[in-house]
Image (cartoon, rainbow, N blue to C red):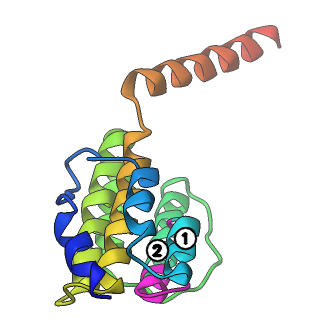
Amino acid sequence: MASYYYLISSLPTLSADGGMPFSYEEFLRLCQSNVSGETYKLLKELDLSSDKGPLLDEWGAFYRSLSKELNLQRSVKLGKAYPVVFDKDPVSSSVASAAVAAGDPLTAERILLAYEFDRLDDMVGLHSFDDFVLFGYALKLRLLERACSFEKKKGEKEFSDILKGLEDQVMSL
């Protein structure tokens, strides 16, 4: 745990509207000699739906609830029923509604990313140099990794290709 002081204080600040200062693999290399084998294994296997480990049980519950809320909002927008029952959080409902109503998917992702960063900050709270901070940082890095995978030009091309394919199918009928 004493090695966490140097490790955590040496990590650059992450923000929802910023880029990735380094890859998740580089983060793991920084952690490898500074954390226990068990903690390293959890970090190595970490994904956004992880729910086992420090902070991850609370994150997992939040992330599942937000996903269900998004699915509900999308279903309502499409006029379909969503039969899954879950505990609704009014803030998550509001954010999901704003994301679903956003003009484009990239804007929706940015809305969700900012909310997820805020929630992680709340979950970490006043922890300073412990596993809560380390796992909160790792989750933020995973979120940024996901956000950086969205490329506007590539997305527009993919959308255009799908639309063209559908048009070709309709024309062949």
- Are there few (<14), some (14-19), or many (20+) residues within 10 Å of tag 2? many
Residue 167 falls in which quadrant of the image? top right
The quadrant in which the C terminus is found is top right
Q: Is residue 99 visible?
A: yes
Q: Is residue 132 magenta?
A: no
Residue placed most toward the observer, 100 or 3: 3
**Looking at the image, do the residues carrying marks 1 and 2 touch, with CB atoms under 8 Å apart?**
yes
- Are there few (<14), some (14-19), or many (20+) residues within 10 Å of tag 1? some
Tell me: residue 78, above or below residue 88. Answer: above
Q: Amino acid at mark 2?
A: Tyr
Residue 80 falls in which quadrant of the image? bottom right
Residue placed most toward the observer, 153 or 9: 9
Residue placed most toward the observer, 107 or 100: 107
Give the x, y percent position of residue 24.
43, 54
Of the two numbered discs 1 and 2 on the same chain, state the one appearing first in sequence: 1
Give the x, y percent position of residue 108.
34, 49
Using the numbered discs, state the Cα–Cα distance from disc 1 to disc 2 in whole angstroms.
7 Å
Q: Amino acid at mark 1?
A: Ser
Residue at x 55%, y 70% (from the top left corner): 49
In the drawing, does residue 160 fall left or right of residue 100? right
Residue placed most toward the observer, 5 or 25: 5
Give the x, y percent position of residue 46.
53, 68
Specify start and end residues of the magenta stretch as a single range.
48-61
Q: Is residue 56 magenta?
A: yes
Q: Secondary structure at mark 2?
A: helix
Q: Is residue 51 visible?
A: no
In the drawing, does residue 150 fall left or right of residue 9? right
In the drawing, does residue 12 fall left or right of residue 133? left
Which residue is disc 1 drawn over? 49
Which residue is disc 2 drawn over? 63
